[in-house]
Image (cartoon, rainbow, N blue to C red):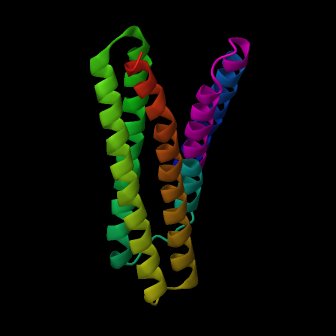
Amino acid sequence: EALAAQARRIEEKADKIAIEARNEIARFDADASIELLVNRAEQAIDELEQAAFISSLVPDAIAPDLLGPLAALCAAAVEGAEAAATGAACAADVPEGHNIDAEDALAAVERLIEAEHKADAAERAVTKTVLGGDFDLKSGLSVLELARAVERSTEELAGFVHLLRPRVVAYLST
């Protein structure tokens, strides 16, 4: 429950940051795609907070054959979050003419897309294991819901970098 409570606090803080960002976007009449980036990042955080909540409900003893694909899924989500953060940080310096940052941002985009594909495969492996196994209802359902929430976070992060990539490429072509 401590993880879920901490995740809730982080998600609430992220909501406040997103509201402030949207206000600044409106105040400066910034490109609408920036708000879309904020929305995707906020949704990814929401999904991770949901995953933390669900993890607090998962039974203590999870069947060992579920742990492997679940761990792979979580590792892919971490990899994706790191790539998204790196991509955003590098992309922020691209308008200042730092081409190496553009290259780093585009490399982060590729890493996140790879991580999202890994997450898809791992989520399917969890689903296949649960539906093909003989698990009690609470274990099966909670692990499925946890896997779905984590995978949805990677989908949101992938959407984030799909919005980020054209902005970086546009700066490179000017």
Quarter holding the C terminus is top left
- Give percent across and percent down for residue 6: 55, 42
The image quadrant of residue 51 is bottom right
Tell me: 160 left or right of 113: right
**Is 130 located above or below residue 38 in the figure?**
below
Q: Which residue is found at the position 32% from the left and 21% from the top?
A: 101
Magenta stretch encompasses residue 37: yes
x 52%, y 36%: residue: 163
Give the residue at the far front of this rendering: 173
Task: Verify whether residue 60 appears in magenta.
Answer: no
The quadrant in which residue 50 appears is: bottom right
- The overriding secondary structure of the stretch rendered in magenta is helix
Whether residue 1 is visible? no
Name the residue at the bottom extreme: 134
| Image spot of residue 150 (x, y percent) | 49, 56
Left or right of 82? Residue 130 is right
Is the N terminus in the top left, top right, bottom left or bottom right quadrant? bottom right
Q: Observer-nearest residue: 35 or 119?
A: 35
Residue 24 position within the rendered picture, expressed as x and y whole percent measured from the top left: 67, 16
Between 136 and 69, the one nearer to me in the picture = 69
Q: How many marks?
A: 0
Q: Residue at x 33, y 42 (%)?
A: 110
Left or right of 151 in this view: 32:
right
Looking at the rendering, which quadrant does residue 105 occupy? top left
Q: Which residues are magenta?
A: 25-46
Camera-side residue of 59 and 34: 34
- Residue 82, percent across and down? 37, 38
Q: Is residue 32 left or right of residue 58?
A: right
